[in-house]
Amino acid sequence: MKISFRIIPWILCLLLFIGCHPSGKDKKKGGIAIKQLDSLYIRTNELITTGKFEQGIVLVREGIGDAAAEKNDSMLSRFYWMANLYFRYKSSPQKDSQQYYKVLADKHAQLSGNKKLQSYILNNLVESLYSSKQYDSAINLSTPAFLLANELKDSIALLDLYQLLRLCYHEKGNPEMEFQYLSRSMDIYSVIKNRFNPEGDDKESKKIRFQFMVLLYSMASYQYDHNDFVKSLAYYNELEAMVPERRKPHNPLIYTGKGNCYAKLGRLDSAYKYLRLALERTDTGWVFRRHRSFAARSYGILLAANGNRKQGEQYLQQSLRLAHESKLTNLVTESQLALADFFIDGRQWQAANGILLAVAKGLPPATALELKIKLYGSLYRVYKESGRYPEALHYYTLVKDHQDSLNTVKAMRTMAETDAKYQTGKKNQQIILLQKNNRIQELQLTEARRLRLFYISGTLLLMTLFGLVYYYRRKLQRRELERVKNELELKALRTQMKPHFIFNCLNAIQDLIVTKDYLLSSQYLSKFSRLLRMVLDMADKNFITLQKEIEICRLYVALEALRLKNTFDYSITVDEKLDVDAILFPTLLVQPYIENAIWHGLSNKKGEKRLLVHFEEAGDSIRCTISDNGIGRIAAGQIKAAKIGAEHFESKGTILAEQRMAMLREGLVKDAFVRIEDRYDDNNIATGTTVIIEIVPL
């Protein structure tokens, strides 16, 4: 199966659409200009690759002018490459113009300093040399291309090069090297295949998926050429399963390949089916005409071989027409030879002779010997069957001469390859010997460096360890000092709060005795003694259980209610979810706020008075809400400012509680805060105050 004319467009399309970003030097020219050039390049690429050459060359010239004005070498290189493609694929290819623009594209790629672009141009030059049948030149140029792709670690570029070299060795008739490069391609793909999502639409996934499709097709073609049609069909089936349904019109070689495999295996119904699919479903764009030509030729040959010569001739003629439209010389020649074979099989000697002479007349000097042998062999048969023996003898002589030349070339190639293998083996032995000597010297130097490095590293390691130990010891000392400082400050604050609390309680008892309410004062004194005992028990504790804190609050509120002759209602409630015996809570944190609510909010109010205290769990925190329906903070402040005499004392409770809250936040709890909210009715009259205390334990 001939594969060169089918695989080239795929590789070319990949190289055309991969695109390279401008270098850092070019980016300084302005983001807007670069975006405009990129957009222009994309439109140009679409026109050139879809066969709209005259429209495309207009944009190419515009792009060259704009990129030159911007001094953007990266974009200049890309537009010069588009100009090369124009002169390569237009109706009358101009090789001098192609070469001129190739040189310019390569020159500006080098000036840009953009190695990715340089790699892109080098790969394209290798492909161009392959397409023009300069296989040895393509192989030679692949060396710097490989070096650059390896430097960039560009697996996609390496796959492109391996595919091109495989095709070069295929055309040179060297199946060993062809399979070697095909195997290398599969090795690279097996390394990078896990980097992409097979169903992904990102640029990287599409490129790698495309490369794998090319590899599968190459393996299928290789197996077909070596008559292993079952394996070839298996690769085509895998390829068909991988291509999305919407992309199959752009991959007609799947259907053509499967059709040819089925034909070789004698499964004619399947062969007809897939060859028809190749003709019916292939995209009608210019790029795909070559594929439609190949499909039409295969279908025509199959029809003619199975007795339907009329339809077979129609498809062979269609194949020739599409080949001419694609402007690919090899494709035209192969289509002409297929049609000539059709006429020979039908003993239509004159028609076959006309086609074969036309092929011979237009045959380039660099045509492969195999193709010349096939052409001259067909002419020999035509003239022999027509009774024109002198002409038959002439072409028979040409066949023998070219066959001898081909055998000589193959023999010389074999000798050259054998000699090259010998010289390579000899050089490899010398290299191995030199490498061993160098290795010995390197080991000696490495040992000396290693010993020196060991001493230096050991010294540095000991110094580092000493520094780390010293640093962490100092850090632990600072933490311990900080902890002790916090505890001492917290104790100092508590010792300030306890006298303040006891002083307030004794004042209350004094008031009851003065008013001669001895029963009430006795009850008060009993509860006060119990409360005092609890406070003294907690003298050296930063935290107590939440149950004890709640009990203190209840005793304190009961004392204040007795003192004020039960003039206010109160309620202290606890959420059932709280495990009050297990939760630790800062000692005497809530009492000062309850005291403020009673003495500053409720005591100065007339009418119904209520105090509500509620403990609950709020996420990771313990929340205490103290709510009263007193006169509010503003009115309380005004009353306090107006007071004079013995009963006016500065209330320190809440100030000390706030200081304790700040101390708690310095490592004793995760977080602690108090929020105080004033409540108002619709007439903006104060209806009370709400205090919310939240503690997040460690």
Image: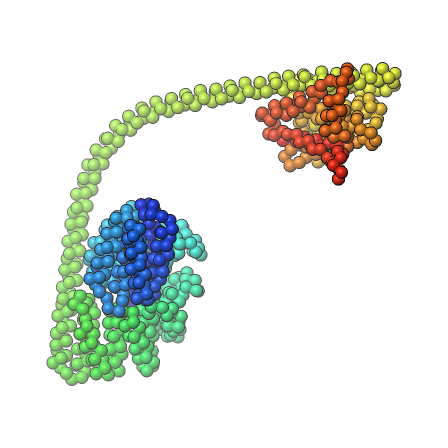
What's the coloring here?
rainbow
Can the viewer see residue 389?
Answer: yes
Residue 581 falls in image quadrant: top right
Image mark count: 0
Q: Quadrant of the N terminus?
A: bottom left
**Residue 677 percent location from the top left of the image:** 69, 33
Q: Residue at x 76, y 18 (%)?
A: 644
**Farthest front residue?**
642
**Residue 101 percent location from the top left of the image:** 24, 58
Q: Residue at x 88, y 16 (%)?
A: 516
Q: Residue at x 13, y 64 (%)?
A: 408
Can the viewer see residue 135?
Answer: no
**Residue 612 percent location from the top left of the image:** 76, 32
Q: Residue at x 68, y 35 (%)?
A: 617
Q: Quadrant of the C terminus?
A: top right
Q: Is residue 295 left or right of residue 521?
A: left
**Residue 312 percent location from the top left of the image:** 32, 79
Q: Is residue 363 left or right of residue 540?
A: left
Q: Is residue 428 left or right of residue 598?
A: left
> Closer to the camera, 607 or 642?
642
Q: Is residue 252 above or below residue 614?
A: below
